[in-house]
Image: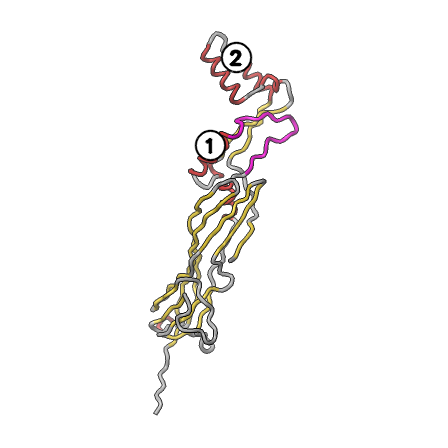
């Protein structure tokens, strides 16, 4: 199988942003509480926001630093469902805001496994399928009508593709698996259920899992028959943060020109 190590820039779905100075938040809260004097509902709301978003706002109001707010960006998630559970997980396990002293950076948020997996897969290019065939007769490398033509994948045609990406403590592994070649050509009867077996001298008839029989020569097609080859992959991922998922399917294709000749009968007298 062929594998790759993805190298790409990965941005977390949820992160801290904003940078509101501590003194500005303190001034806002002081004004809010002043306006809430004598209004129980307004004071209750101010207390709620203070506890939820700005704990210790009075203390930090006299310090040189800023408040950062948690936010989640839907465009960074692979799909709406994943965005939903990432956001819920982040917001229930991290503070909504953090106060960061001047000169320091807001906390770095680990990139979730689903985002890492998508980034790893986006960095992968699966090569087009390449094949060899037998028989190969004469200078043209022709095969023959009415017999099994063996078809097998070359070494750069992967049966399995893996890609990994790591950010901080989280690693995502993407795996794409295929069950074999799919063949299509004019005037033919494919019988392919795998990646084929390389032909060798003395190989038994029927010992390959990928053959194609041509029913007509390629003379009427200009001298060669187009053999379309495709490989379909099912793609899934797992990650060390517990994330798992399905990334769908992908198919690679190529076309090989294959001369097909008819067997010439020789009469012996």
Give the labeled residue for mark 2.
Answer: 33
Residue at x 45% of width, y 38% of height = 82
> Which stretch did the figure color magenta?
93-110
- Indicate whether 92 appears above or below 181: above
Distance from disc 2 to disc 1, alpha carbons, whole Å, reads: 31 Å
Closer-to-camera residue (261/91): 91
Give the labeled residue for mark 1.
Answer: 88
Quadrant where the image shows the C terminus = bottom left
Residue at x 55% of width, y 49% of height = 6
Residue at x 46% of width, y 9% of height = 39
Q: Does the magenta stretch include residue 107?
A: yes
Q: Which residue lies furthest to the right in this view?
A: 103
Residue 236 is marked as: none
- Indicate whether 60 appears above or below 83: above
Secondary element at tag 2:
helix
- Magenta span: predominant SS is loop
């Amino acid at each position: 199988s062929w594998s790759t190590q993805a190298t790409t820039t990965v941005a977390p779905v949820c992160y801290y942003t904003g940078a509101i100075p501590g003194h500005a938040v303190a001034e806002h809260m002081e004004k809010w509480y002043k306006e809430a004097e004598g209004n129980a509902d307004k004071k209750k709301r101010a207390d709620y926001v203070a506890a939820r978003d700005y704990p210790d706002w009075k203390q930090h109001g006299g310090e040189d630093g800023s408040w950062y707010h948690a936010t989640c960006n839907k465009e960074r998630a692979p799909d709406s469902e994943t965005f939903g559970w990432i956001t819920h997980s982040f917001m229930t396990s991290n503070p909504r805001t953090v106060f960061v002293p001047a000169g320091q950076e807001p906390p770095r948020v680990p990139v979730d496994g689903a985002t890492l997996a998508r980034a790893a897969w986006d960095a992968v290019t699966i090569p087009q399928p390449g094949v060899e065939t037998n028989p190969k007769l004469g200078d043209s490398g022709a095969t023959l009508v009415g017999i099994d033509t063996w078809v097998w994948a070359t070494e750069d045609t992967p049966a399995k593709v893996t890609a990994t990406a790591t950010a901080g403590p989280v690693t995502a592994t993407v795996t794409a698996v295929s069950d074999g070649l799919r063949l299509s050509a004019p005037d033919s009867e494919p019988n392919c259920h795998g990646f084929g077996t390389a032909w060798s001298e003395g190989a038994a008839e029927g010992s390959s899992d990928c053959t194609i029989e041509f029913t007509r020569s390629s003379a009427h097609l200009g001298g060669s028959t187009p053999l379309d080859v495709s490989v379909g992959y099912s793609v899934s991922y797992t990650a060390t943060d517990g994330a798992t998922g399905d990334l769908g399917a992908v198919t690679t294709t190529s076309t090989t020109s294959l001369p097909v000749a008819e067997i010439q009968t020789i009469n012996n007298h």
